[in-house]
Every structure is written in C-alpha cells, then in structure tokens.
Amino acid sequence: MTLELVNELGDIQVRVVKDRQPIERVQPLKTADAAPLVAIANVGGYWSTADRPAFAQGNVLTLPKLVKQRPVVVGFYCPCWGRYADPFLTTLIDLAHQVDRAGGQLLVFANEHPRYLPQKALQAPMTLVYDADKIVAQQFGVYAETDPIWDRISGISEDVYIPALYVIDGNQQIRYHFLDENFEGFTDHTTLCNALGQ
C-alpha cells in the first residue's frame, strides 16, 4: 500500500507500507469434522445452568459425557459484539427452548464469566461456560489471536469469536455447523433442529 503524507508546509512524502498478513487464519470446524475434546472444571463458577441445578462447584463438564446423554448444540457468544450481541443472545435463548423440545441441549461458550452475562441468559435452558483463555474457541477454529475480528468487522474493538453454532452427535461428529463470519445473523432454526433428530 502506498501512502502520501502531507505536512503543514505542504511537503508530500511517499511511504510504501506492506499489508499486515495474519500468521494464522481461522479455520473453523465444519459439518462431518470430529468435535474437539472439551473438559471444563466448574472452578470459580466457570459454568452456569438454569435447568441443571445439580451441577455443583468443582464438577467437570465434558463434551463426551454430554453427548452420551443427548445431542449437544455448541454455540459461541461474545457480549462485546456491539449491536450484534443482544439479537444473537435473544436468538440463543429462543434456540435453547427449541433445542430442549427437540431432545438436545445447548452449551454456549462466552468470553465473559456467567455472572457478567445478562440475567435472561442465565434463566434460559442452556449451559453457559466461561471460555477464559478462548481455548475452546480456538479448538473449534472460531478464534485466532492472529486473525482478529476487529480487523475485519467495523464496530468491534475487542478480541472476539466468530458467531457459530454446531450440532454434535453421540459419536462426537459435527452434524451441522453455522458460521456468521460477516455478522449477518442466524435465522435457520429448522435445519439446526432437524440435525438434532438425525
């Protein structure tokens, strides 16, 4: 890229600047990929659930254990998505009820501790998990420090995830994926719920 800099005297200086290339582009998981192994201890209240109060401090939440019970929908949510955050959270809450009726369970990873999330999220039939170092998001390929969203989407100034939803079956295979890399919104509840029944 070539820049022309003009000082207060009107002198023009030409500078050539190389475009910054990300070291590692995000490579989100897709349908038919194997889901990563996820295990998070409930230390310091790292996860919270409204519909399963039996989960206590110190318990370990593992994806293999959850998918043995019933299919899991994994979602990623960041409250710092700006104007996109609240509509996506509302979608997740609506989806939580649909997923529950379809026989699945919704597991949402957030980049903030559950105690800082809106109360309406804590009351929905879903499990909210604090992905403290964005490790789970990296495993699913929806976050890379070297490929920041704030570099591509205006209005976002923090390190955040790509909005994503995955349906994971009992064999830990991804049956369905949704990625919103352009922050346009999620509307396809039917296809997601159909993937739960496969």
Image: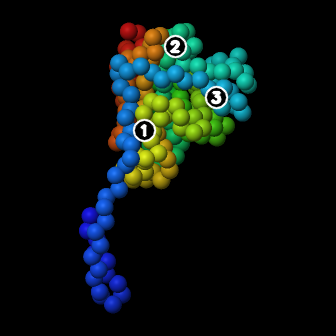
Tell me whether circle 3 and circle 2 mark residues in contact (CB < 8 Å).
no
Earlier-in-chain disc, 3 versus 2:
3
Which amino acid does the dot numbered 1 rest on? Answer: Ile
Which amino acid does the dot numbered 2 rest on? Answer: Val
| Residue 47, label in figure | 3
> Which sits in the foreground, 33 or 159?
33
> Which sits in the foreground, 88 or 68?
68
How far is the residue under mark 3 from the one under mark 1? 20 Å
| Residue 46, label in figure | none
How far is the residue under mark 2 from the one under mark 1? 23 Å
Which amino acid does the dot numbered 3 rest on? Answer: Trp
Label 2 crowd bin: few (<14), some (14–19), many (20+), radius 10 Å: some
Q: From the top left corner, tell me how far across and down residue 195 is, in percent.
A: 38, 15
> Which sits in the foreground, 95 or 61?
61
Q: Can you see residue 50?
A: no
Name the residue beneath numbered marker 1: 162
Label 3 crowd bin: few (<14), some (14–19), many (20+), radius 10 Å: many
Q: In which quarter of the image is residue 34?
A: top left
Give the left or right position of residue 4, taking residue 72 as reference: left
Residue at screen point 39% across, 28% down:
29
All told, the count of numbered labels is 3
How far is the residue under mark 3 from the one under mark 2? 17 Å
Q: From the top left corner, tell me how far across and down residue 63 is, in percent.
A: 54, 19
The N terminus lies in quadrant: bottom left
Q: Which secondary structure lies at badge 3?
A: strand
Give the left or right position of residue 128, taking residue 149 as reference: right
Q: Which secondary structure lies at badge 1?
A: loop
Name the residue beneath numbered marker 2: 67
Residue at screen point 45% across, 41% down:
144
Q: In this view, does 40 lie above or below 131?
A: above
Residue at screen point 64% across, 28% down:
47
Residue at screen point 72% across, 24% down:
58
